[in-house]
Image (cartoon, grey):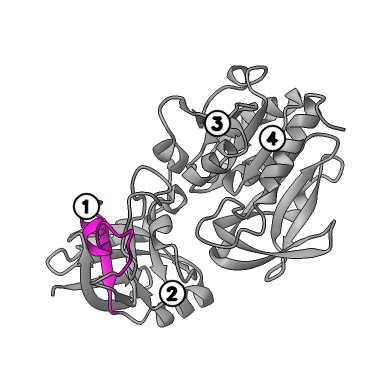
Amino acid sequence: MKKAYLLLADGTLFEGTAVGYEGQSIGEVVFNTGMAGYQEVLTDPSYYGQVVTMTYPLVGNYGINFDDYESRKSWVSGFIMREMCEYPSNWRCKVTLDEYLKAQKVVGLAGIDTRRLTRKLRGEGVMNGVIYTEGFEPDEQTIEEMKAYVVKDAVKTVTCAENIVYPAEGETKYRIALFDYGVKYNIERELCKRGCEVTVVPAYTKPEDVVGKYDGVMLSNGPGDPAENVEIVANLKELLKSDMPIFGICLGHQLLALAIDAQTTKLKYGHRGVNHPVKDIDEDRTYITSQNHGYAVVGESVDPKIARVRYVNLNDGTVEGLEHIGRPVFTVQYHPEVCPGPMDTSYLFDKFIENIEKSKGGAQ
């Protein structure tokens, strides 16, 4: 087996064995604490530009199937694990993890001390790195590029080019415009099974192409710095004037917060995993949630006359969701559509449907 390496921006070098595609790739090195769900991680557009470290020691034991993709391809810049299972055992398995990484041209690294790497990222914060296979050693110019690397144009890169329509399961009750900032397929699935015809629209779709033509608006998850998306935020400011029911998830939550003139900030090492406790302040109830984000809304920057913080993270107190004052608009930072992971918060899709019914006069 060939050797492979991870070189961090501070000069720390990890040596292991090569898996997946042979080559070299630069990215922001992050970690995910989920015990399962590596296929969903690999195909989640929110990981665009990132080298993902899985903290669970064995990865690949159930292989890769053709049903659990969360988007059309893998978006990660690299994939790191303690041990890769070479002989998966699952009746749904179609290819091994190694075969999938090769097909998607994802450079992988196994056999390193992922606990040491994770502790370093937790202590010092996420940092840039270059992952490379033996024979693809970075030169000085590459190392300088790695140190200066910033995830840019992320939403522009992952969004769809044109509208895509997904029919409702059974009778069509409502028509939803789902803005694709890096959407996961399971958001569409959750809406479709509730009787919604879902039209996935490009991230930069104008408000006038949505208002009056759909019953509600979903704002999807996605990658990158939310503050970078100036044009999208301006569009959302206009969309908010329409009184349409809106539900924002993850990046959609952050962008809607920026649209009401709140602020966002980059977290030290982000939230990526499936066991984050979130408290619903109104119900005095805690949910276990799946999360994947490196930025958060600054709670103190939210104007209480416009919106209020409804959900908070019990680990670090960061904002996990907003509720608009007087309008059918709400957001969450976590993922109620997650699969695999806790399904405790899937009721939020029902809440969105209830808001649509109320706006149409179908419920009181």
Image quarter in which the N terminus is found: bottom left
Q: Which residues are magenta?
A: 89-111
State the mark number for residue 55. Answer: 2
Alpha-carbon span between mark 1 and mark 4? 38 Å
| Helix, strand or loop at mark 1 | helix
Which residue has dot 1 on it?
A: 103
Say whether residue 106 is magenta: yes
Which residue has dot 4 on it?
A: 246
N-terminal-most mark, 2 or 4: 2
- Within 10 angstroms of label 2, few (less than 14), some, or many (20 or more) residues? many
Q: Residue at x 61, y 33 (%)?
A: 195
Where is residue 353? Give x, y as percent: 71, 36
Where is residue 203? Give x, y as percent: 51, 32
N-terminal-most mark, 1 or 4: 1
| Relative to 278, 362 lies left or right | right
N-terminal-most mark, 1 or 3: 1
Alpha-carbon span between mark 2 and mark 3? 37 Å
Image quarter in which the C terminus is found: top right
Say whether residue 290 is magenta: no
Q: Residues at badges 1 and 4 in contact (C-beta under 8 Å)?
A: no
Alpha-carbon span between mark 3 and mark 4? 19 Å
Judging depth in this view, the residue of 227 and 200 nearest the camera is 200
Q: Residue at x 69, y 35 (%)?
A: 246
Amino acid type at mark 3: Ala
